[in-house]
Image (spheres, rainbow, N blue to C red):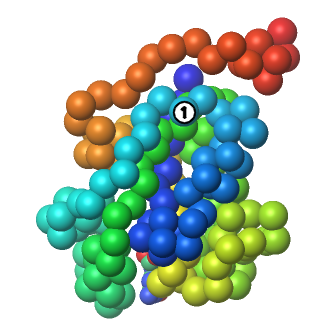
Amino acid sequence: AEQTYIMIKPDGVQRGLVGEIIARFEKRGFKLVALKLATPSKEHLEKHYADLSSKPFFPSLIKYMLSGPVVCMVWEGLDAVKTGRAMLGATNPLASAPGTIRGDYALQTGANVCHGSDSVENGQKEIQLWFPEGIAQYKLSSADWVYES
Ligand code: GTP
Ligand code: MG
């Protein structure tokens, strides 16, 4: 099944949105296969956002991501990458639809609460980067009711 790397950024943790964000993915029907609170190094965050290293906002992005602990998760299920991005909303929260995480809880791009993988391939890379220890494999009993038979 498809997996996506979802991360609650420092502002999301500090604002008490961890439970809310986890609940949305749980209720949607996705399976939680990895979860931890982490305080990543600058080098680790630069690797995570390596594709953006030439952007003018890169230093401020790294500073933002270093401002506190983050919550790292892997969610698994049908079309998890695309659906996860849809649940997060647009990069700029002012352009995010109400009902999305950013559209409900954020106002600015530099404080947009959460990260989600943008492709299956990048998702697998991010899962390796953030969970080198590996992730869980188990059957979620509710899957029989979430997915049509
Ligand atoms: P992520 O899920 O965090 O990867 O966001 P995204 O895929 O919606 O956007 P992108 O990968 O292009 O940018 C990564 C992050 O960099 C964004 O979520 C923002 O936090 C930050 N960012 C992107 N563009 C800007 C910008 O123009 N200004 C500032 N200050 N931050 C930006
Ligand atoms: Mg991105």
Does label 1 point to a residue whose CB lies under 8 Å from ligand 1?
no
- Is residue 58 shown left or right of residue 141? left
Residue type indicated by callout 1: Leu
Residue pushed farthest left? Answer: 43
In front here: 62 or 19? 19
In front here: 148 or 112? 112
**How many discs appear?**
1
Residue topped by disc 1: 32
Determine whether the residue tagged by mark 1 lies in a helix, strand or loop. strand
In front here: 20 or 64? 20
- Is residue 148 shown left or right of residue 92? right
In front here: 135 or 77? 135
> Can residue 55 be seen?
no
> Can residue 130 be seen?
yes
- Residue found 48% across the figure and 30% down from its top: 33
- Residue found 43% across the figure and 40% down from its top: 35
Please identify the quarter of the rendering in which residue 26 is found. top right
- Residue found 71% across the figure and 80% down from its top: 95
Vertical side of 6 occupied by 14: above or below: below
- Residue found 32% across the figure and 77% down from its top: 67
> Percent position (x, y) of residue 41?
18, 64
Dividing the image into 4 quarters, which one contains the C terminus? top right
Dividing the image into 4 quarters, which one contains the N terminus? top right
Vertical side of 8 occupied by 55: above or below: below
> Percent position (x, y) of residue 28?
75, 39
Residue pushed farthest bottom? Answer: 56
- Is residue 149 shown left or right of residue 7? right
> Percent position (x, y) of residue 84?
62, 49
Vertical side of 82 occupied by 76: above or below: above
